[in-house]
Amino acid sequence: MERWKGRVALVTGASVGIGAAIARVLVQHGMTVVGCARSVDKIESDQNWTQNFRRGLTNTLYIRSRLLYSVIRATKKLAAECKSADYAGTLVAHKCDLTNEEEILSMFSAIKSQYQGVDVCINNAGLAHPEPLLSGKTDLWRNMINVNVIAMSICTREAYQSMKMRNVDDGHIININSMSGHRVIPSSATHFYAATKFAVTALTEGLRQELREAQTHIRATSVSPGLVETEFAFRLYNNDPEKAAATYENLECLKAEDLASAVVYILSAPSHVQIGDIQMRPTEQRT
């Protein structure tokens, strides 16, 4: 990771969970990390809420009564934590609604003005709605496509253009995918989500091929985790917190830090090594 010291990484969805863990570890390794998060009214509860669920101490009313904070505030809090810990790098919070292309372009313009450009792009932001194929809401299908596919593709394009403009030939684009991008489980709540993650699988390989055609050494990698104990299930089943909690109860899940370690492994690979996809599950996960 020595060669990445002082260089710039963009991490989308950096406020909580996997994104926060990745941002933190890159700062620890001396990178300047721009953590992208929304500043809209959607809010997250205290970071310990999943632990409370596991102890059986919470219910829907309790969750809604927790001290709530905005996503951008969470990213700023993480940045302050990194600073107080005296890590080698820096984390900067940047508000951006990834469903709005103008905001994405404005973010890249700001990064160019302040830091010259992006050397590593971690497309981590993603979401799921429990909308079946036979009865799902169109606007929520569209929301999944806009965030999981379109926004990722825009960030990828702009990151590559940033690298190309500065003659950066060793950059890296990492897409946080899912095992749902490789198989379809019999759960109607996640079928459309799986389709967006299959798209991520195809787009990552397509990106690798286009980078080779461009005769660049910029690399593209997908990381596909199984169950990770984050806020994901609580967002997916936000009207059924007991079901969300049960998702993580019967096995030892991956931790967000496991994904962060995978990203460090990818970025540490020798320049002649192209890691296409890392698939990782909890040892006890069957599907």
Image (cartoon, rainbow, N blue to C red):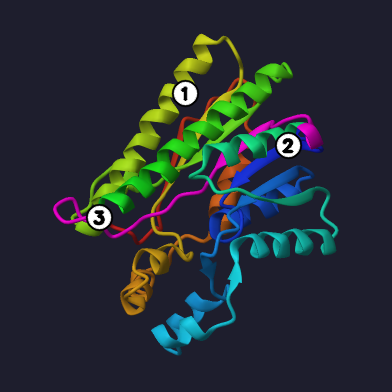
State how far apart marks 3 and 2 are (Cα).
36 Å
Mark 2 or 1, nearer chain start: 2
**Residue 111 image label:** 2
Seen from this angle, which residue lies furthest front?
102
Amino acid type, mark 1: Leu
State how far apart marks 3 and 1 are (Cα).
30 Å
Mark 3 or 2, nearer chain start: 2
State the residue in front, 44 or 83.
44
Amino acid type, mark 2: Ile
Q: Residues within 10 Å of mark 3 (few under 14, many from 20)?
A: few
Asked whether the viewer can see residue 271, the reply is no
Q: Residue 177: x and y, percent?
A: 43, 43
For the point 58% across and 76% down, the residue is: 68
Badge 3 is on which residue? Answer: 137
For the point 31% across and 51% down, the residue is: 139
Quarter of the image that includes the N terminus: top right
For the point 59% across and 43% down, the residue is: 263
Amino acid type, mark 3: Lys
Q: Is residue 182 left or right of residue 148?
A: left
Q: Is residue 133 magenta?
A: yes
